Image (cartoon, rainbow, N blue to C red):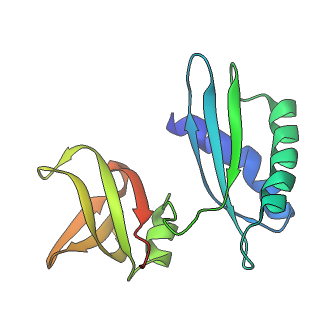
Amino acid sequence: MERMQHTLTALIEPAVTAMGYELVGLEYRPSRRNGLLRVYIDAPAGITLADCEAVSHQVSGVLDVEDPIQGSYRLEISSPGVDRPLFNALDFERFAGAEARVRLHGLWEGRRKLCGILHGVQDGCVMIEEHGTHYAVPLERIDKANLVPDV
């Protein structure tokens, strides 16, 4: 699965950046009937529906030519939103000081989820402070992470 994520990112990112957008990340959920490829984009001025449509058209063309996905799937282009997903070490560094929800692959130190303040990345571990306790979570143990919106 991680190999497919890397392949898709390598195909899609040049097209997205050439259009003036940032590829925040992508989620690929294969399925026998109808998989899902969700691509998150951003821009300094924010993202509109017209931006999503333009990127969808361009990315569809790249995927049609390269054909990296077997079977049928839906392509969704989206803004990262207020609960922005965090995909890599750079994201965890960029949003140090923000609150995030983190879901882990299996149990890690008896936990499946953490919710706390990000303190960047050290030695391949995401530093998270939850209720005064500091955790160093190996990046590869993180299944999904999102910022917690300020309300």
Residue occupying image coordinates x 59% and y 35%: 4
The image shows residue 35 at horizontal and vertical percentages of 61, 28
Q: In the visual, does 139 lie left or right of 11? A: left
The quadrant where residue 145 appears: bottom left
The image shows residue 76 at horizontal and vertical percentages of 69, 44
Count of numbered badges drawn on the protein: 0
The image shows residue 138 at horizontal and vertical percentages of 30, 57
142 or 40: nearer the eye? 40
Q: In the visual, does 69 lie left or right of 125? A: right
Residue 129, compared with residue 64, is above or below; it is below
Residue 52, compared with residue 57, is above or below; it is below
Residue occupying image coordinates x 50% and y 57%: 87
Q: In the visual, does 11 lie left or right of 28? A: right
Extreme-bottom residue of the structure? 97
The quadrant where residue 27 appears: top right
The quadrant where residue 93 appears: bottom left
Q: In the visual, does 6 lie left or right of 148? A: right
The image shows residue 80 at horizontal and vertical percentages of 59, 62
Image quadrant holding the C terminus, namely bottom left
Residue occupying image coordinates x 50% and y 60%: 85
Residue occupying image coordinates x 81% and y 47%: 56
Residue 129, compared with residue 106, is above or below; it is below
